[in-house]
Structures are given as structure tokens and as C-alpha cells.
């Protein structure tokens, strides 16, 4: 076993061993609520990871399957007395077992070509957007995420238009934030994307992302390069520049025009729980219209990264629960700040038969 593998197993064990197996996590684990099997809950996944580090089980595909089923939503941490970082254990275990996986972790050549073309289209469409009406001291670079490039360029244009009301916006043809590779355990690929983005944004002071997955991942770049003598300082400076859209708008005191519609909000796990950004989008939305809180706003919708394609039945079940809560809220519009969540919520809106519509928060603000 290499020193790198030994260190990884040590890191997994140090976190997983804090679990006292009380089972509180099972009360809030979304996937356990669907399947009610020990292996499908946070406690079972932690036990599998811990057994791997102690040699109790071999590094087999069954262990990888168990830790792959985790949404990485972090709901378990909220109720854990020991605050066991389950998502971190799952990611490290996937990294340890990455050679056993043949699942896709990057975009195809065709998708990458489409994403590059999307940047050209974004620049073309945003060329006519005027800057702030008053002289602005703010400058911000927009991070153009992969899902926006592939499926929602209209929304990205709305975000740039929104940011342009309060800042001079710079468009940079960035690389992927690296979350898909990180989710699958390919940390080396993630780090290569991180280094490219660090260089691309070296000369800007503020980076704004309108996708919770991207903003959360970019803020964590510093931690993954903390022990690299060549990159640690540059990575730390990079991560400090990153803001989520609602975080940035709230910071500079943006006020939206008023809408007549009743609005509710879905918390992306990567924004609310991971970054602690919960009040900012709500405060913005309360100025934008008749805001109403829905039940289970911070419960995962089943849409993170590869989960809907890997586990479609579980994803659909979680989405149906989210749809019912949206309908019960009475809101005409549900909004969020994550493109993966938005894709899910749009599906929920279709299933609702027109009872509500799903839009990105930039389209409301």
C-alpha cells in the first residue's frame, strides 16, 4: 500500500470513528427514508467506510455501491451529536475505491464543444447589456457553470444582466468547477481543473457563481491544495474571492423590483447547508414579492450531480415529496440557486400540471 493510500485510509478512519452509531442520522437521511435499509442510511455508509479502514471488509464494488448512494446532502450532520462529516467520508472513500468504478466522471467531447460554443453565445448576447446606471466601484467576474452552458444559457444571460445593474461584469471562459470528477472520486482531475481556474481568475478580485454546486466547490479549492507549496497561497486567495449570487447581492445591498406572484424557495444542499447561505436568498426574495416558506425547504430534491441518472427511482421519489411541499405552500413560483436543483424542480412543475413554475433566483430578482 502506498503512503498516499495509507494517509487516505487514516483520514477516513479519523472522521468515521467519531460515529457512535446512535442512529439519529437515519431520522433525516433522505435515501434511508426511501429504502429503510441500514446500508442505505448515513450510519450504514459510515460503518462500511470504517470497516474498510480496519480491514474488516475488502475494497470491493459492494462498498463503492454503498458510498455512491449517498446524496452528500449533509442533513445527517445537523442532527449528529459528534458532527460526523459524512459527505467528506463518502468522498474520501470514493477516492480510495475509484479504480473499481467505470462510471462517467467528465463531460464528453461533444458536450465540451457545446460548452465552449455556449461561452461565445453568452458573450454575444451579453454584449448589448448596459452597465450600472450609476458609477459603480464594484467589479465581478461571472463563473459560467457547465449545467448553465449545456441547458440554461437564457438563465445565465439573466444573471449577467442582474449583476450588470450593480457591477462591471467580466466574462471569462472558465473550466468546470470539477465537482463531477470530485463526486466520483477523481481528485486528480478535480485539482487540474482547480489549477486552471486559479490561473484564469488570478487578476480579478471577485468571482460570482449563480450555481450552488460551483460556488461551494470553488470555495473548497483552498482546502484541497493547502499542502501544495506551489499552489496553497494562490488557492487560498482564489477561494476567498468566490461568492454565491445571493450572497454577493445581499452583501452589496441589492433591492429587487416587486412582483405580484407568491414565491417560495428551495435550499440547495450545496448552498444552505454547505455554505451556510440561507437567509440571504430569502431576504432578497422577500423584497421581490409575496414570499412564503414551504415545509422541507432544505430537504434534498434528489438532483445532485449524477444521482438522478444513477438512481432514477430514488431521485423521483424525493422529487415527488418536494413537489407536494411546493404545492402545499400555495406558491405560484418556486425558485432556487442551483442548476441541478432547477432541472429537478422544472420536472416537478411539469408533474404538477401547471400548479406552479420553477425558475432560477436570477429570473426573479
Image: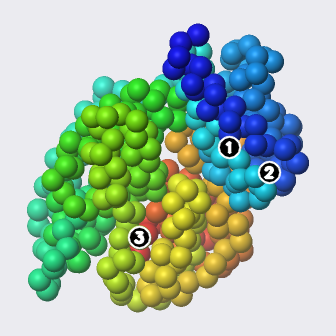
Give residue 345's quadrant in the image.
bottom right
The answer to whether mark 2 and mark 1 are in CB contact below 8 A is yes
Q: Earlier in the sequence, mark 2 or mark 1?
A: 2
Disc 1/disc 3 C-alpha distance (Å): 26 Å
Q: Is residue 85 left or right of residue 140?
A: right
The picture places residue 175, in percent across and down from the top left corner, at: 28, 40
Q: Which residue is mark 3?
A: 247
Label 3 secondary element: helix
Q: Earlier in the sequence, mark 2 or mark 3?
A: 2
Q: Which residue shows up at 34% across the image and 84% down it? A: 253
Residue 147 in sight from this viewpoint: no
The picture places residue 131, in percent across and down from the top left corner, at: 14, 74
The answer to whether mark 1 and mark 3 are in CB contact below 8 A is no
Q: Is residue 3 left or right of residue 301?
A: left
Residue 86 - label: 1
Q: Nearer the viewer, residue 312 or 13?
A: 13
Residue 25 - label: 2
Amino acid at each position: 500500500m502506498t503512503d498516499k493510500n495509507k494517509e487516505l485510509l487514516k483520514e477516513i478512519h479519523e472522521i468515521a470513528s467519531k460515529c457512535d452509531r446512535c442512529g439519529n442520522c437515519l431520522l433525516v437521511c433522505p435515501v434511508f427514508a426511501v429504502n429503510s435499509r441500514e446500508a442505505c442510511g448515513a450510519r450504514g455508509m459510515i460503518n462500511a467506510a470504517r470497516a474498510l479502514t480496519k480491514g474488516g471488509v475488502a475494497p470491493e464494488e459492494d462498498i463503492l455501491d454503498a458510498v455512491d448512494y449517498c446524496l452528500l446532502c449533509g442533513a445527517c450532520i445537523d442532527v449528529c451529536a459528534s458532527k460526523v462529516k459524512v459527505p467528506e467520508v463518502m468522498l474520501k472513500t470514493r477516492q480510495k475505491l475509484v479504480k473499481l468504478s467505470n462510471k462517467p466522471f467528465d463531460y464528453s467531447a461533444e458536450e465540451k464543444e457545446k460548452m465552449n460554443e455556449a461561452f461565445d453565445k453568452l458573450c454575444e448576447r451579453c454584449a448589448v447589456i448596459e452597465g450600472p446606471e450609476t458609477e459603480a466601484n464594484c467589479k465581478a467576474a461571472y463563473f459560467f457553470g457547465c449545467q448553465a452552458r449545456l441547458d440554461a444559457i437564457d438563465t445565465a444571460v439573466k444573471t449577467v444582466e442582474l449583476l450588470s445593474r450593480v457591477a462591471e461584469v467580466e466574462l471569462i471562459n472558465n473550466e468546470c468547477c470539477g465537482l463531477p470528477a470530485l463526486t466520483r472520486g477523481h481528485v486528480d482531475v478535480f485539482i487540474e481543473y482547480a489549477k486552471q481556474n486559479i490561473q484564469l481568475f488570478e487578476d480579478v478580485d471577485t468571482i460570482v457563481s449563480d450555481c450552488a454546486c460551483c460556488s461551494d466547490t470553488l470555495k473548497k479549492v483552498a482546502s484541497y491544495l493547502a499542502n501544495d507549496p506551489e499552489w496553497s497561497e494562490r488557492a487560498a486567495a482564489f477561494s476567498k474571492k468566490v461568492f454565491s449570487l445571493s450572497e454577493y447581492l445581499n452583501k452589496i445591498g441589492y433591492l429587487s423590483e416587486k412582483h405580484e406572484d407568491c414565491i417560495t424557495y428551495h435550499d440547495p444542499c450545496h448552498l444552505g447547508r454547505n455554505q451556510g447561505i440561507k437567509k440571504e436568498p430569502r431576504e432578497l426574495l422577500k423584497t421581490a414579492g409575496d414570499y412564503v416558506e414551504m415545509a422541507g425547504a432544505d430537504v434534498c430534491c434528489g438532483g445532485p450531480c449524477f444521482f438522478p441518472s444513477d438512481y432514477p427511482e430514488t431521485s423521483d421519489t424525493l422529487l415527488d415529496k418536494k413537489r407536494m411541499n411546493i404545492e402545499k405552500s400555495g406558491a405560484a413560483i418556486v425558485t432556487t440557486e442551483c442548476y441541478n436543483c432547477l432541472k429537478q424542480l422544472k420536472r416537478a412543475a411539469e408533474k404538477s400540471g401547471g400548479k406552479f413554475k420553477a425558475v432560477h433566483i436570477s429570473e426573479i430578482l
